[in-house]
Structures are given as structure tokens and as C-alpha cells.
Image (cartoon, helix red, strand yellow):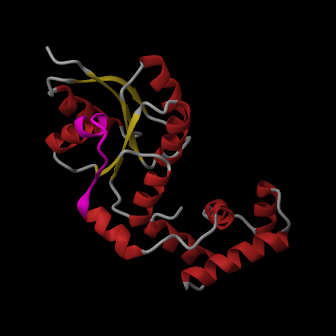
Amino acid sequence: MPLMIRILLAEDQAMVREALAALLGLEPDIEVVAQVARGDEVLAAAREHAVDVALLDIEMPGRTGIEAAAELTAALPALKVVVLTTFGRPGYLRSAMEAGADAFLVKDAPAAQLAAAVRKVLAGERVIDPTLAAAALAGGANPLTDREREVLRAAADGATNAELATALHLSQGTVRNYLSTAIQKLAVRNRAEAVKAARDKGWL
């Protein structure tokens, strides 16, 4: 009897989460022992269920999969992290690797490929979808600073400069400067286009 690999599955769409759990459950050496729908529930669930591998969706409420990956890596360094995405954005791959992810795969990959990736990361390998890897190399590095990304993320819902300044504890002039620099770096005309361009690249 092989040793069972204990998996935590973090995915906010219940249908996708249950389908992934069912497919992985067909593998003789894999058991999905915990499921969460929010990124801010990942660390507690990983600790409670003593998991070996965490499979994290990128876009979740509470915390993104990339933020959750960084949290797991810092708190539970022996745990392996596989980031799954519907969005093949090169910036996401870079961010996931910087957060300490051991694998980065698209969600529609065959179940056998996902199971193989789980076994590989436990064996100490790093697994990256080859198409995404090529796109990341071609896409170049993220030109935005952490502060510029923070301001753009906060501006995504249409907040005014005054609202952004209050929320981020900055002056309105500083907010304007960050937005202006981000718009210039992304070669777009306004903040809405800057948010869209940064998201499309996976930089937010």
C-alpha cells in the first residue's frame, strides 16, 4: 500500500473544486483531506489537516492564491505548493515562483498531469506548464513597483484620489504620482486602462 499524499484544495468555485477533488481521489496514492473556498482559510486548514501539498487557485476571496502561497511557504516550509490558474498570464507565473510555489499549471490540464505534478514536487522537482513558461520569458519583467501595484489594485473599483489617499494612508499628491508613473510605464492613457493592462499581464 503506497503512502497517501495528503492534499489541500483551495478553489472558490464549488463545482470546479469538487470536480478536481473527485478526479484526484481516483489516484491510488492521493487523498484530498481538506477543501477551502477562500485564500485566507488556506494556512489554518493546512495546519489542521497536516497536508503534504496545497493546490491553490489564484483568484479567490480573502487572499489570492499567490498571497496564500507566500504565507504557506513562510509558515510551513516543508509543504509543497501547486498554483492552478485559468488565466495563462505570464506575470502570474513570475509572482507564483517568487511566492515560493513549486508548480504552476493551468486548471484545464488533464487530471493525470496534475497528479504527476503533485508527485514530482514531493520528489523535489519544480513543475511549470511549458506554454506559460515561454510566455513569461517573452513577456518581460513586471515594471511596476510594489507601491504602484498597491495603488492600482486599490483604484480598480473606481475610487477617487482622495478615497485612495485615505485608504492607503498617503497624500493625494503621492497617489497621483504613483498612478501617473504606472500609466506611463504601461503606455496607456488613464488609470482604468492601467488596471486592465496590469491585470492582463498578471502583474496585479
Quadrant position of residue 94: bottom left
| Range shown magenta | 119-130
Residue 83 image point, x, y percent = 37, 46
How many numbered callouts? Answer: 0
| Residue at point 59%, 86% (across, down) | 189
Quarter of the figure with the C terminus: bottom right
* Residue 149, magenta (yes or no): no
Quadrant position of residue 119: top left
Foreground residue among 114 and 85: 114
Foreground residue among 45 and 133: 133
Foreground residue among 2 and 197: 2
| Residue at point 42%, 19% (across, down) | 50
Residue 170 image point, x, y percent = 83, 62
Q: Visible in this render: residue 64?
A: yes
Residue 195 image point, x, y percent = 56, 70
* Residue 128, magenta (yes or no): yes
| Residue at point 55%, 35% (across, down) | 40
Left-right relation of 165 to 17: right
Quadrant position of residue 115: top left
Foreground residue among 68 and 94: 94
Left-right relation of 112 to 189: left
Q: Visible in this render: residue 39?
A: no
- Above or below 17: residue 47: above
Instruction: Residue lying at the far top in this picture: please name it.
Output: 1
Quarter of the figure with the N terminus: top left
| Residue at point 57%, 75% (across, down) | 194
Residue 99 image point, x, y percent = 50, 49
